Image (spheres, rainbow, N blue to C red):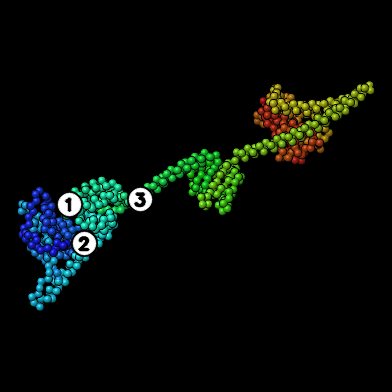
């Protein structure tokens, strides 16, 4: 089917029974291939009719399109050339012969011969093909048949030429450079890409010497010794594929692959392919560089994140980053504590989800920062958060726009400092200041009241003493009434002084008691006897119990309490009225009550009645004397006796003071 297809059958030396005479013991297939190569056969089949080797052009002419025909049944592959298969069948029976197709201007003819081994066993058969010229017609009647045969033969030839051209075009169009070298180191085929890749001219390859071609490219590689050794190793027959990377001095990198060229099972040469992988290698190198740069950048980023994470975790204030959609992207532990959760739980959640109570205040401020791009700094807020429901918390808040290098606002950075403790401390300081101011006011009021109260008995006392001195100087008898009035004012002054002393003792914890069994009934009668006849506007009454109601206590101090309560009842009933004292048993306690019909005490001031220096606002100093110490001292005395004291009152409807003590 190549140039040798037109050779005369006599070139086969008319072998009726071709025999192989090898010097060694090759396999039957190798013997068959050796005989076929020596006969320039286009087709070789084994004794079972399976194809050992077939010229690709012949396979195309037979219509075979299903890959390599080697190993396939010749009857299957030669479906388009049945006359050739019939000739092979005869040869496989040990008979050689000549066969040809049935028409055309030129006819395909085949010489088929059986091939036998040295021991006489048939190894297979070979077929050699050639074109035959159209024979001269002997009669005018045969001219049409001869023309038809010539046309058919021309078509077959054109088909074979077309297949050969197609294979060559395919060989030259592939992107890899390909060269085929036989075992004699002769170049049997190469494509244009191979010439372009190595810069080889047709003249350099004219004699097809592989060693000469190798020497011409030696100076073009960066490692010529290694390259030459690799190529020469490939000249040795081997079934193993080989590969290598060749670097050229002009910077190109070629990937070299080598596979054996087989004729059946025999190696008849080597096929070398070269692919330019310079761009691929550069891309891989650039990719490696980018990966290394990315790895380095990632490490730096991780270091930055580690520093940022450390800063966030140890920051004393809450820090957070909120995206343009008002969803949390990042936050620290302090921020999570405000939200009542753990760090990271707020990621992806909205401001309203995390702090629903504060969202109506926070969201407009964040949107303002996003829209205007200006920060809001040092804003004080008060409200409730999930971490402390029902409790008012206080914060100092700042919002900052977070921008890219180009100025695009990505979101809002929030800095939240919890100032609840500071706020409460300030509130406590304010309270203490108010209390101090109130204490100063009370002190000033007390000084004013004390000065007035001291002056009130001193002025008449001085007057009566002057009158007594005048009478004595004049030799007159001293009037008893002046002495009694002077003594009364002195007693009043003593009470004021004693109240002040008792207050000091209470504050110092030095109030002393002489406890003894005391009958409250007798004590009440004794105290009331002192007030009999002191006021014509008041009536004193005592609902005495049937039993003595004995308590363990200091008789003088309990009398001081009763005296103070009765005196207040009289004092704060300026228009007169009844003052009633009752005593009754209440289980294991005894309850004493003093009731008047006076001005009463406002509800909002009743809780302060037993405080030091307190005076009800509806009791003017000018009308009602006293230092505001009596009830304070009375409460301390009762409580130190294991009891309690309280008041029931209504403005303009009088007051009732009660105290209870443990009863023996």
- Label 1's element? loop
Q: Badge 1 local density, few (<14 within 10 Å), some, or many (20+)?
A: some
Q: Mark 3 points at which residue?
A: 282
Q: Spatial distance from mark 1 to mark 3, Cα to Cα? A: 36 Å
* Mark nearer the N terminus (3 vs 2): 2
Residue 590 visible, this orientation: no
Dots 3 and 2: beta carbons under 8 Å? no
| Residue occupying the point 20% across, 49% down | 235
Label 3, secondary structure: give it: helix
Looking at the image, is mark 1 or mark 3 earlier in the sequence? 1
Q: How far apart are marks 3 and 2 (CA)?
A: 40 Å
* Residue 465, percent from left and from top: 87, 25
Q: In the image, what residue occupies the spot 88% across and 28% down?
A: 463
Name, please, the residue furthest toward the front: 203
Measured from the top left, where is residue 82 in percent x and y?
13, 65
Q: Of residues 317 and 356, which is closer to you in this image?
A: 317
- Residue beneath disc 1: 183
Q: Nearer the viewer, mark 1 or mark 2?
A: 1
| Structural distance between the alpha carbons of marks 1 and 2 | 30 Å
Return the disc, 1 or 2, that comes first in the chain's sequence: 2
In x, y percent, where is residue 643? 67, 29
Q: Name the residue under label 2.
A: 65
The answer to whether residue 118 is left or right of residue 441 is: left
Residue 342, above or below 271: above
Circle 2 SS class: loop
Q: Position of residue 243 (x, y in %)?
A: 26, 49
Q: In the image, is 388 to the left or to the right of 114?
A: right
């Amino acid at each position: 089917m190549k140039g040798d297809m037109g050779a005369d059958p006599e070139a086969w030396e008319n072998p009726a029974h071709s025999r192989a005479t090898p010097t060694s013991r090759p396999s039957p297939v190798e013997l068959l291939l050796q005989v076929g190569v020596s006969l320039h056969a286009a087709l070789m089949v084994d004794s079972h009719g399976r194809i050992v080797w077939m010229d690709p052009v012949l396979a195309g002419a037979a219509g075979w399109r299903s890959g390599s025909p080697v190993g396939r049944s010749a009857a299957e592959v030669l479906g388009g050339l049945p006359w050739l298969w019939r000739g092979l069948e005869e040869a496989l029976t040990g008979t050689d012969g000549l066969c040809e197709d049935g028409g055309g201007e030129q006819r395909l003819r085949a010489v088929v011969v059986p091939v036998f081994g040295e021991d006489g066993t048939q190894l297979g058969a070979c077929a050699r093909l050639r074109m035959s010229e159209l024979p001269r017609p002997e009669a005018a009647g045969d001219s049409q048949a001869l023309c038809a045969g010539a046309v058919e033969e021309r078509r077959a030839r054109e088909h074979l030429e077309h297949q050969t051209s197609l294979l060559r075009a395919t060989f030259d169009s592939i992107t890899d450079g390909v060269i085929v070298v036989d075992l004699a180191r002769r170049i049997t085929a190469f494509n244009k890409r191979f010439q372009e890749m190595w810069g080889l001219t047709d003249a350099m390859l004219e004699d097809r010497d592989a060693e000469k071609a190798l020497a011409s490219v030696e100076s073009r590689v960066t490692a010529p010794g290694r390259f030459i050794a690799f190529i020469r190793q490939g000249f040795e027959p081997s079934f193993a594929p080989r590969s290598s990377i060749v670097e050229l001095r002009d910077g190109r990198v070629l990937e070299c692959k080598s596979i054996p060229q087989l004729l059946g099972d025999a190696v008849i040469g080597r096929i070398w392919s070269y692919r330019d992988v310079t761009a691929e290698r550069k891309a891989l190198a650039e990719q490696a560089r980018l990966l290394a740069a990315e790895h380095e950048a990632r490490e730096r980023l991780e270091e930055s994140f580690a520093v940022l994470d450390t800063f966030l975790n140890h920051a004393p204030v809450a820090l957070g980053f909120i995206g343009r959609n008002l969803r949390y992207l990042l936050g620290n532990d302090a921020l999570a504590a405000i939200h009542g959760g753990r760090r990271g739980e707020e990621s992806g959640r909205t401001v309203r989800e995390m702090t629903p109570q504060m969202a109506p205040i926070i969201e407009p401020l964040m949107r303002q920062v996003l829209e205007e791009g200006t920060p809001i700094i040092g804003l004080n807020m008060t409200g409730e958060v999930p971490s402390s429901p029902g409790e008012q918390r206080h914060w100092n808040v700042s919002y900052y726009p977070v921008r890219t290098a180009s100025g695009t606002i990505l979101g809002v950075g929030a800095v939240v400092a919890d100032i609840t403790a500071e706020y409460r401390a300030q509130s406590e300081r304010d309270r203490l200041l108010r209390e101090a101011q109130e204490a100063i006011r009370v002190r000033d009021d007390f000084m004013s009241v004390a000065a007035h109260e001291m002056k009130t008995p001193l002025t008449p006392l001085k007057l009566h003493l002057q009158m007594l001195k005048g009478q004595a100087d004049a030799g007159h008898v001293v009037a008893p009434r002046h002495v009694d009035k002077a003594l009364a004012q002195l007693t009043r002054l003593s009470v004021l002084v004693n109240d002040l002393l008792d207050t000091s003792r209470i504050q110092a914890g030095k109030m002393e008691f002489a406890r003894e069994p005391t009958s409250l009934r007798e004590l009440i009668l004794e105290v009331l006897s002192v007030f009999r006849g002191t006021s014509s506007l008041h009536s004193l009454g005592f609902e005495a119990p049937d039993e003595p109601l004995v308590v363990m206590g200091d008789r003088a101090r309990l009398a001081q309490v009763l005296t103070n309560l009765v005196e207040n009842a009289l004092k704060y009933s300026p228009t007169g009225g009844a003052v009633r004292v009752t005593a009754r048993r209440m289980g294991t306690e005894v309850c004493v009550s003093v009731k008047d019909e006076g001005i009463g005490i406002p509800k909002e001031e009743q809780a302060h009645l037993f405080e030091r220096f307190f005076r009800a606002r509806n009791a003017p100093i000018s009308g009602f004397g006293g230092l505001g110490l009596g009830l304070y001292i009375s409460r301390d005395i009762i409580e130190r006796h294991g009891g309690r004291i309280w008041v029931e009152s209504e403005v303009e409807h009088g007051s009732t003071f009660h105290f209870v003590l443990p009863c023996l």
